[in-house]
Amino acid sequence: MNQAENIAGYLEQFYRVSEYPALIRQVEEFRNSGVFRNRRLFDATPVFRNTLAKYLPLIAGGAQLTVGINSRVPHDQEIVRLLKSWDIEVIEENPDAERNFDIVMDCAGVYTGVKSNCGYVELTRSGLYHYRDSSSPVFFADGGRIKLIETALGTGDGFVRAMQKSGFGDFDGRKIVIFGCGKVGRGIAVCASAKGADVIAVDSPDVIPPVNVKIVDMNSPDSIDRALENAWCVVSVTGKANAWKGRFNIAKLLDSSSLIVNMGVEDEFGPEVPEQRVMNNKKPLNFLLDEPTRMRYIEATMALDNSGAAWLLQNIGRKGIIMPPEDMENGILAISAQYGEIRDELKAMELM
């Protein structure tokens, strides 16, 4: 069997086609268009079981795929072993300096130093910081509406599942303090609140939190310290390294019985907080799961990331940060809504 057949056969063991309709549609689209034929793609999306579905359209479309794994981004070593057994090139840490690719599909800005002929696709908001001065085109997959599915629904669901797997599945009446009330923070807040938790979000006072979630001013150390009193769990989701240094009494938090969770790729609590004091040793808690984000919630994001790579190859010469075109997102969302399993949730989020 070839690489695409190996991946498709493996995925059939775990997923229904209705869980990743946009990626399945891309298989035919990219095969027919030939946009990736003989193109060298370097893909650094975190490698887990459902990531294989992202590779399927690229390989079916003729791409020469290289997968990058890095110590800064968690991955599933068993899936890495499978990729190698299927003769898909895997590079650990950094490619040789002389290697270059047509497109680099990055995550968290880990591979800004890898040479790319036609540009970069960045998967995360935290990674965009690393590309702010880039002279190459950078397709910002986190910049559109689709990423809300993964962050607001998928990451919140992943947080709850990871807490359950860790033996902390009873949220009822427990206080959870969430540092950051952006897309990811809101998703975690909504899911935790639905499980019965008393949720407090720490952010700018002009942020409007979800229903039943209190907001605490991030610029008021006394208010933060009061919010942290008797907290069952403290979660950081800002996307920024060392985000909370000097903003509250970290020593008091360390001496408490509160669970501490990092949900971003960066070390948001900083060196003052030892690794062993944070669940999953400061790695995003949902990454201890076989499927950190369920396929149904992440497949549209992976499809958008793939479409970003195709867009760059079809628009050579563009510069700067490129936001996902509205028609591109609408097309992916339409397929997810018509053939997928999250139609009602898309409507509730007013994405359709």
Image (cartoon, rainbow, N blue to C red):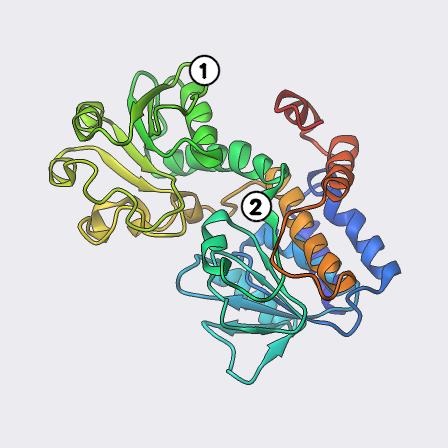
Q: Residue at x 74, y 31 (%)?
A: 337
Q: Secondary structure at mark 1?
A: loop
Q: Quadrant of residue 161?
A: top left
Q: Quadrant of the N terminus?
A: bottom right
| Image disc number at residue 142 | 2
Q: Residue at x 29, y 23 (%)?
A: 216
- Hey, which residue is sitting farthest bottom in the picture? 98
Of the residues shown, which amino acid type is indicated by label 2?
A: Asp
Whole-percent x, y for residue 99 in the image: 58, 81
- Answer left or right for 59 relative to 73: right
Whole-percent x, y for residue 248 in the image: 18, 35
Name the foreground residue: 194 vs 94. Answer: 94
| Image disc number at residue 211 | 1
Of the residues shown, which amino acid type is indicated by label 1?
A: Val
Q: Residue at x 31, y 50 (%)?
A: 282
Badge 2 crowding class, 10 Å Cα cut-off, few under 14, some 14 to 19, many 20 or more, is: many
Residue 18 visible in rendering: yes
Q: Against 305, is 148 above or below? A: above
| Image disc number at residue 131 | none
- Answer left or right for 123 relative to 234: right
Whole-percent x, y for residue 84 in the image: 59, 72
Whole-percent x, y for residue 214 in the image: 34, 18
Q: Against 241, is 130 above or below? A: below
Q: Quadrant of residue 339?
A: top right
Distance from disc 1 to disc 2, alpha carbons, whole Å, reads 24 Å
Q: Against 301, is 350 above or below? A: above
Name the foreground residue: 60 vs 108. Answer: 108
Q: Secondary structure at mark 2?
A: helix
Q: Earlier in the sequence, mark 1 or mark 2?
A: 2
Instruction: Give the tally of numbered discs.
Output: 2
Q: Quadrant of the C terminus?
A: top right
Name the foreground residue: 143 vs 290. Answer: 143
